[in-house]
Amino acid sequence: MRTVEFKLNLNRYQQAKVDSWLAIQRWIWNQGLHLVEEFNSFSTWDKVSQTWVPCCPIPWTYYRNSVGQLIAFTRIAKKKPYRMSCPIPQVYRKPVLESPTFFGLLYYFAQKNHSDKPWFCDVPCRFVAGTLKSLADAWTAYKSGKRQRPCYKQYKDKFRTLINNNAKPIKISGKRITLPKLGKVTVKTLDRRWLKSVPIVTLKIVKEPSGYYLQLSGCFPVNKVKPTNKAVGVSLGYSHLTTDGEKVVEPPNFYHKMEKQLAQLQRQLSRQQKTCPISTYNPSSGEHFLSCPINPGKGANRAKTQRKISRLHEKIRRSRRATNHKISTYLVREYDAIAIVKPEIKRIARKPIAIVNKLGEFEHNGANHKAEFNKGLLNNSLGQLSGLIEQKASVQGRKLISVSPKDIPDELKQCAEKRREQIQWSRAVYSTNFSRRYRAWAWELTPGESTETLNQEPPQGGLFCDAGTTSNFISESIGFCGVGDIPEIIPLLQNQSEANSSY
């Protein structure tokens, strides 16, 4: 499955349509979540009859008696025999939904059941089904313990995506695509980047600060890369990258470069006049709007500044993801086997513990320095980079070994300690054979250098990967060698990871 993104050029009428649909999706989400929670409070799945049965809002479960039968009980009673029902009287009401699944929600939100809401019937039913599918998946993941409870969407929580999970009937002719209730829309590079033989599986219309985007997903044919019989070990650090020729490659800290501009715009935003706090309710659309009856244009300058800030954040996010795509594509194309040492980002980026002395006063715990360190660590999005490497390696059939810093063999730690003395940069990530057949980016070159000086042959033996953050983390984030043919390090790492997983 592959997703391709295009820029949409919508006219004012089409933009107003998409904005109104996005606002209605918030009402659909909140209404559907309320109905699911109501069903969960007054209904439960009976394991004996295998049906949904009425129940009390108090949590209850089953226990087996001496015969082995399942008996329902609540844990309010502390002693046996447990009560068969809740002793607290509750006002029972029959749930509106027949089941809390996607099909139960889809039946309730059918347009024939809401003929009195013309604003709801204006939304294409496939986009409504896409939102309900996301809600049903979120609720199922919550009940299985995989994620947190879904939250209600407030007025400030803008919906940004319209999802169509059944987009096969949509037609594409050249550079034009026919969207439901929007007509034919011209999309640049649609005829070049999307194959006519590939059917559309999922269609998304995403609203970003820079405009509207079209995302198409489909099963593209995979062009397998040639085997190179080489391996590399990568330790994901946070400060630098370097090549075999001992050329330090500083990461593109996009957020750090635009931090001053963001601070200036945010100070300007804090001084500008806010919108009127008077809230008006439109019953025809079921939405609340913030507007001033005396001066409707109040707060227009503040909205413009907010759009500038949103565009800067979007630029940072897209630039960071583009850089991670380049690095992951290079690694997957050049190496048959990749070993990655994943740093424990959650553990490293957590807040420092408060220090209290004997007098009950708080002492300095380095929270400000830790905040700056966390900002630089999260700016490089190491989790996104490792995820892209795993995804592309599985598609191309490359061998990927994920190693925890705790699972590094002692032999590699001792060898890396010897190499550590030869390295002058204490906070750097050393990636072997990174410069071979590699065209340098503009941000990699210092003044007076060219791509020829950067793409020189590496020295004999290469360098070991090393990632240093703090003194406690240096000993955990030790990298691996990756020179020439596949060395014996890959089976060594694989055996070590298998041994640790067996316990």
Image (cartoon, rainbow, N blue to C red):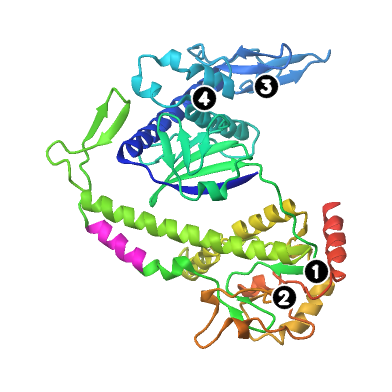
According to the picture, the residue beneath numbered tag 1 turns out to be: 230
SS at mark 2 in the image: loop
Q: Position of residue 447 (x, y in %)?
A: 49, 86
Q: Nearer the viewer, mark 1 or mark 3?
A: 1
Give above or below for 350 relative to 174: below
Position of 113 with respect to 194 (left or right) is left
Q: Nearer the viewer, mark 4 or mark 2?
A: 2
According to the picture, the residue beneath numbered tag 2 turns out to be: 433
Q: CA distance from mark 1 to mark 2?
A: 10 Å
Look at the numbered discs 4 and 2 and tell me whether their residues touch, using CB distance below 8 Å.
no
Q: What stretch of residues is rendered in magenta? A: 261-271
Q: Position of residue 381 (x, y in %)?
A: 56, 61
According to the picture, the residue beneath numbered tag 4 turns out to be: 37
Q: Position of residue 90 (x, y in %)?
A: 50, 14
According to the picture, the residue beneath numbered tag 3 turns out to be: 61
Position of 134 with respect to 272 (left or right) is right
What residue type is disc 4 on?
Answer: Glu
Look at the numbered discs 1 and 2 and tell me whether their residues touch, using CB distance below 8 Å.
yes
Badge 3 local density, few (<14 within 10 Å), some, or many (20+)? Answer: few
